[in-house]
Amino acid sequence: MKIAFFDSGIGGLSVLHHAIQILPDEQFVFFADEDNVPYGTKPREDVLKFVDDAFEFLLTLNVKAIVVACNTATSVAVRAMRSKYNLPIIGMEPAIKRAIDLYGDRRVLVTATPITVNGEKIKALINKVGKAQLIDLLALPKLVEFSERQEFNSEAVTTYLKDKFAPYDFTQFSSIVLGCTHFNYFKDTIRAILPDNVKFVDGNSGTLRELMRRLNLQLPEINNNKQPHIEFYFSGRKITDPNELDRINNYLKRLDKMQSIN
Ligand code: DGL
């Protein structure tokens, strides 16, 4: 049976990209809700409905687990989905705990969508981590739109980020948490703006560890560079058009480049 990765758009590919490397023997379904992206600036009730529709569809594909590769959808809908559907559902939250564990008592800039930043779930997470005085939250909704149109390094992206980062004294920060899966595409652009002491932290490896734990999966002993089988869907339509498959491949190639940027 296959493992589904779900996101509002192409951000979830950053989690799938990692999964392909560590779990080459699995079969994957990737579902991007391209008809409804972005989620992060929409009313929560709308997002709940989009996620529920996507789950209904994914269950027709006979999947053994769903990874919600979207912090926004997790913030709004994961609890409701877990009480409605009876299969392992792995959510994603901004990796704030990981940033504090890795870098200790220095400031952390947590970037995400407006829904995630304003949601109750992130407040609960910050309380649980217990370092509220070290955490700054910053919504970067335009990065979702930029990445959906494959615009990663333009003047407009750089100006947007410089403007959003301007209020912070980055000498005080250890790290920037990429709390939206669409943000992984911008690591080179962000790296060129922020000083080297500010490291990237994302939730990809933690999410996949949780997936492996839930499904009792092991890392393969030898990595034979096998390409796992993946089916792609945009809002319930199977992608077979070579141009659309090319677009997806371009994102995966960009993620290859982003991977080594810390
Ligand atoms: N990729 C999503 C996340 O991780 C949200 C993007 C959006 O649709 O606003 O939060």
Image: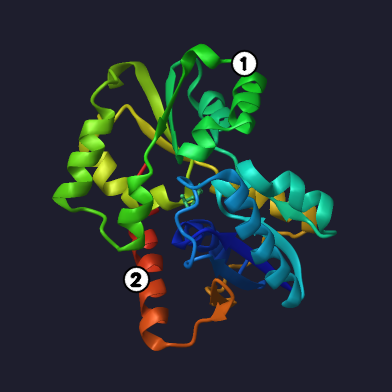
Q: Give the residue furthest to the top.
A: 133
How far apart are the alpha carbons under marks 2 and 1?
A: 40 Å
Vertical position of residue 245 compared to residue 253: above or below: below
Tell me the residue at 52%/39% (across/down). Answer: 115
> Which colour assignment does the render follow?
rainbow
Vertical position of residue 74 compared to residue 102: above or below: below
Quarter holding residue 1: bottom right
- The tag on residue 130 is 1
Q: Position of residue 111 (x, y in %)?
A: 42, 35
Q: Earlier in the sequence, mark 2 or mark 1?
A: 1
Badge 2 amino acid: Asn
Vertical position of residue 214 compared to residue 198: above or below: below
Q: Secondary structure at mark 1?
A: loop
Quarter holding residue 166: top left
Local crowd size for mark 2, using a 10 Å CA cut-off: few (<14), some (14–19), many (≥20): few
Badge 1 amino acid: Gly
Q: Position of residue 141 (x, y in %)?
A: 38, 44
Tell me the residue at 63%/44% (across/down). Answer: 76
Q: Give the residue furthest to the left.
A: 155
Q: Position of residue 3 (x, y in %)?
A: 69, 67
Q: Which residue is mark 2?
A: 250
Tell me the residue at 30%/55% (across/down). Answer: 146
Residue 149 visible somewhere in the drawing: yes
Vertical position of residue 176 compared to residue 4: above or below: above
Asked whether mark 1 and ligand 1 are closer than 8 Å, the reply comes as no
Q: Secondary structure at mark 2?
A: helix
Local crowd size for mark 1, using a 10 Å CA cut-off: few (<14), some (14–19), many (≥20): few
Q: Position of residue 56 (x, y in %)?
A: 72, 68
In the image, taking residue 134 as reference, residue 249 lies left or right, namely left
